[in-house]
Image: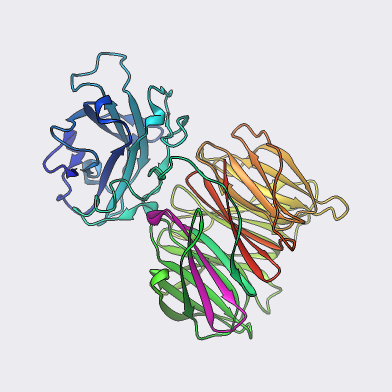
Amino acid sequence: MRRSLHGALAAALLAACTQPATQLVVVVDSDLAPSEYACVGVVVSRVEGGALVQGDRRMFDVPGLVAVPFSFGVVPPDGDASRRVEIRAEAWPSCDEPAPGAAPLVSRAVRTGFLAGQTLRVPMFLGARCRMVECPEPQTCDPGAGVCEVVPELPPESLSPVRPGDELRDGGAGGGADASPPSGECTPVAPLVIRAGNAVGFEVAPRPAAREWLLLASTDTGVALDTFALDGTGVTARAPLSTGVGANGIAAVVPPGTDDALVAVWRNDLARVDRHVVRDAIAGAVTPDFLLGSLRQRGVAAALGGDALIAHDEQGLGDPLVVRRMAASGASAVVFRSAENRDVALAPRASGGALAALTDGATAGRCDVIAIAPGGGAAAPSPVPADVACVSVGVAELSDGRVALVYVNGDAAARRASFALLDAGLTTVVMRGDLGGAAPGRVSVTAGADGSFRALWPSAELTTARVDAAGAVGPLETLTVAGADPTTARAARQGRTTAVVLRSGTALHFAALCD
């Protein structure tokens, strides 16, 4: 039996799902045996700066008052949608007030915020693997791995909108960053061939609500945009979309928490870019819209709330790097323009903004990292010292706020992949290191939930290295694609899984890596 709570909860922070639209709907689920616990405690605290203003604990009798999974609402403190909150759920053996110093059987916490006028679902899972795992502040137990991690920051833009009353219809906590996978573990997948033919451009992005991946690939047929839904075993659905143009490149982004995609497709004549809003990509609906002209294709994109960032070269102006904000409404605006560049990477930030990392062709031996505000404005570049010129870059924000920049140095005789960790303000390089691996190609970076990150690059094989929160580099691993060398790779992160799509010869390959 599933149940939603209706009525007022504690301290005016918890409200029923039928209250005003600016709210969170928290879905609590668990794989604990019913005999192990009798109550679920809920604490909602205000986050003010780096401190918590802790709220009262409300205890819910299980299965007397509620049956797991159940849901409850959280409204903004003082009605201010800009406020952030920490939500903590706890499993207790009884509904008596806990004794001072007593620890719950299982506890889980997340931090998030609000979007004005929207109701967002926050999944929380009390995992049996966290049984009696006590984590020091400000940490919480990862329900899948059963180990302590920094309390996850869930940007409200990454949460799925929900209509109150519908939040339990897909299996409780299903979907979202805190949902537990069916097996409770990440399962690696060796490279699988998912498409034959010449994919001239492709991108992969998570579909959090479906626990799947969305792959979009433009083809040399000139009119098709193939979309694939993927899980841990391979292709679950496929839908060819007609773009109506000769596509020679693609940049695609799936805003977190949705199944929609904003896609830019470059025509073969390089004279224009056609923008497509793909609604429910696997169902095949696409809305084309002319976007920009006089551009060269670049194929780099990142989510910025419900909008997208597209990086490209601008033809006729010395090929500077231009990053545009592409709004869901169709509007487009330049975020920043650089001097001559060689490579660029874009990544979303937990604060709602984004990061851009680029090699600076005008200043040899330097990579730049630029912070892009949630509204689309850009700060001044932060130079990252490097011994030699950077020729390829990847960037990601880590769970503790630091920024990982992975770059390939420009020494043609001994080209290697290196990394630099920057502080959250992008003002200081706190650590540098060598990843090894000769002659790497274009690098990608995906961030883990524990302050670690993974770097990937194609060479004779796909090479990957994991760096922990302290900067220690793990052993290099390789993925071999049968029959040919990988030439291009795209990577995306969801939970504890890094999905990789490789191009080798005329085929695309899908693989899954675990931490």
Q: In this view, does 140 lie above or below 478?
A: above
Tell whether 2 sits left or right of 514: left
Main SS of residues in magenta: strand
- x, y percent for residue 419: 69, 44
Q: Report the front residue among 134 and 276.
A: 134
Question: Does residue 377 appear in the picture of this structure?
Answer: no
Can residue 441 be seen here? The reply is: yes
Q: Which of 70 and 183 is in front in this view?
A: 183
**Number of numbered markers:** 0
Q: In the displayed structure, does residue 79 sit left or right of residue 224? A: left
Give the image location of residue 422, x and y in percent. 62, 41
> Which quadrant of the structure image shows residue 312?
bottom right
Residue 484's spot in the image, x, y percent? 74, 63
Instruction: Decide whether residue 226 is among the magenta residues.
Output: yes
Q: Is residue 368 above or below residue 283?
A: above
Please state which of residues 311 and 360 is positioned toward the viewer in this rendering. Answer: 311
Q: In the image, which residues are magenta?
A: 206-228
Residue 500 x %, y %: 59, 55
What quarter of the picture does the C terminus occupy?
Answer: top right
Q: Residue at x 44, y 80 (%)?
A: 288
Q: Residue furthest top?
A: 100
Looking at this rendering, what residue extends furthest in the left direction?
Answer: 7
